[in-house]
Image: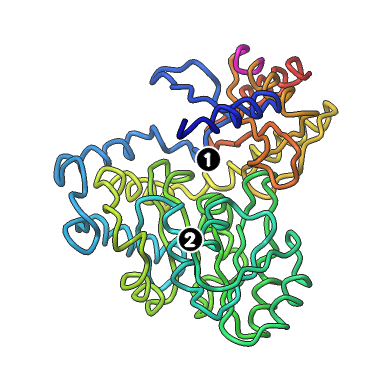
């Protein structure tokens, strides 16, 4: 049979405890949420919901076409202006997802003959962007400026370094200032995926590059997602205006993809304005993460100290990680469960996401449930 090989792969996944399944959630779920990426608690904020509804009423349910045809509304361009200004960059370009933004940035900024130096812990979207680019990719040790220096030092020609700002598995931050200094020594560009930093790090949540003093640099390009701290959907690339113009003319995931739905654009714009008005949300998310880590570590869990809002708790095996997460869910707490191939080191984890709107009582309850459900 044409697809007979699929069942063989399915059996192998079942044996390894790596089967994944969709689990629809109810709108009124009673679970305490430590699994989503809604870091600032804005996905259900009344102003964000109204921003989505108002945009849908005005522009309709869909963008109706690619951004270069009919898919750009006034809301898209307003979001781009406010996002660039908030994060400290000259220009921005909105995409239908953060994944599409990463594919665009790397495939458009690494032409034939160029070198991409990629951190070993990078997200799958960055890895796929490297695969689509015409340049050569060299993977270097995780968060290691010296390894990046060695890779760039041996190359002659255009080059970029690409890294997550905050890595989604363990929640550790990249040494952005040091990596950028290494890039500048060799004239290379810096591409930073700030999906988990925007809204959490930097003054008022302006992101990890802003915190590192890199915002607005002529050699720095940043990608973000609108689906985490901003509680909406979509992604964007931020950087110098010539880079953004280049993406408009060359990035395939921009040119050939339908524009982001107006409702998502309106929600993201509303969320960004809430964050500007309430910058304390960013600090609260970091405080919640630090408290979660401290209490889990005190209970003897192998928890990784967070640099942003992700707290990772290591599990003995994929099967035990799945059982642990399921038992937490049965006790009323939703947690993430990361297993191979989603984890670069092969170690399965519970992945907890701190939210700015979690109370101290809810944090304590979550820690108790995780401890009681531990394999």
Badge nearest the viewer, 2 or 1: 2
At 48% from the left and 25% from the top, the residue drawn is 22
Q: Is the residue marked by circle 1 packed among few (<14), some (14-19), or many (20+) residues within 10 Å?
A: many
Task: Determine whether, in the image, residue 51 is placed left or right of residue 327.
Answer: left
Task: Determine whether, in the image, residue 71 is placed left or right of residue 86.
Answer: left
State which tag comes first along the sequence, 2 or 1: 1
At 27% from the left and 53% from the top, the residue drawn is 259
At 58% from the left and 54% from the top, the residue drawn is 201
Residue 84 among magenta residues: no
At 67% from the left and 68% from the top, the residue drawn is 138
| Residue receiving disc 2 | 223
Q: Is the residue marked by circle 2 packed among few (<14), some (14-19), or many (20+) residues within 10 Å?
A: many
| Residue receiving disc 1 | 39
Task: Determine whether, in the image, residue 120 is placed left or right of residue 56.
Answer: right
Cα separation, mark 2 vs mark 1, equals 18 Å
Q: Secondary structure at mark 1?
A: loop
> Looking at this rendering, what residue extends furthest in the top direction?
330
On the image, the x and y values in percent for residue 42 come to 43, 38
> Looking at this rendering, what residue extends furthest in the front direction?
1
Residue 114, picture quadrant? bottom right
Q: Main secondary structure of the magenta part?
A: helix
Nearer to us in this view, 154 or 83: 154
Task: Determine whether, in the image, residue 299 is placed left or right of residue 24.
Answer: right
**Quarter holding the C terminus?**
top right
On the image, the x and y values in percent for residue 189 come to 56, 77
């Amino acid at each position: 049979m044409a697809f007979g090989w699929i069942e063989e792969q399915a059996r192998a996944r079942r044996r390894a405890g790596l089967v994944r399944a969709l689990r629809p959630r109810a709108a009124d779920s009673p679970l305490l949420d430590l699994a989503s990426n809604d870091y600032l608690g804005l996905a259900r904020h009344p102003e964000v919901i109204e921003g989505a509804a108002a945009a849908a009423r005005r522009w309709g349910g869909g963008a109706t076409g690619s951004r270069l045809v009919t898919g750009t509304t006034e809301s898209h361009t307003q979001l781009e202006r406010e996002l660039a200004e908030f994060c400290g960059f000259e220009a921005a370009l909105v995409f239908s997802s953060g994944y599409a933004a990463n594919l665009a940035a790397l495939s458009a900024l690494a032409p034939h003959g160029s070198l991409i130096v990629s951190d070993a812990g990078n997200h799958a979207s960055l890895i796929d962007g490297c695969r689509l680019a015409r340049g050569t990719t060299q993977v270097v040790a995780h968060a290691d400026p010296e390894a990046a220096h060695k890779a760039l030092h041996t190359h002659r020609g255009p080059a970029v370094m690409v890294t997550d700002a905050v890595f989604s598995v363990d929640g550790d931050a990249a040494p952005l200032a040091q990596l950028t200094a290494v890039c500048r020594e060799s004239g290379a560009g810096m591409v930073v995926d700030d999906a988990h930093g925007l809204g959490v790090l930097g003054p008022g949540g302006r992101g990890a590059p802003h915190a590192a003093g890199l915002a607005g640099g002529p050699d720095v390009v940043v990608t973000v997602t609108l689906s985490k701290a901003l509680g909406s959907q979509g992604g964007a690339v931020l950087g110098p205006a010539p880079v953004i113009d280049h993406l408009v003319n060359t990035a395939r995931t921009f040119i050939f993809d339908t524009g982001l739905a107006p409702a998502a654009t309106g929600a993201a714009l509303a969320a960004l304005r809430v964050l500007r008005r309430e910058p304390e949300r960013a600090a609260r998310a970091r405080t919640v993460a630090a408290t979660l880590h401290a209490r889990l570590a005190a209970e003897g869990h192998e928890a990784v100290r967070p640099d942003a809002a992700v707290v990772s708790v290591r599990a003995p095996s994929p099967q035990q990680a799945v059982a642990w997460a399921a038992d937490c869910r049965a006790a009323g707490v939703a947690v993430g469960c990361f297993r191979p191939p989603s984890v670069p080191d092969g170690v399965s984890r519970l992945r907890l996401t701190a939210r700015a709107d979690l109370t101290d009582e809810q944090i304590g309850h979550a820690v108790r449930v995780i401890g009681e459900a531990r394999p």
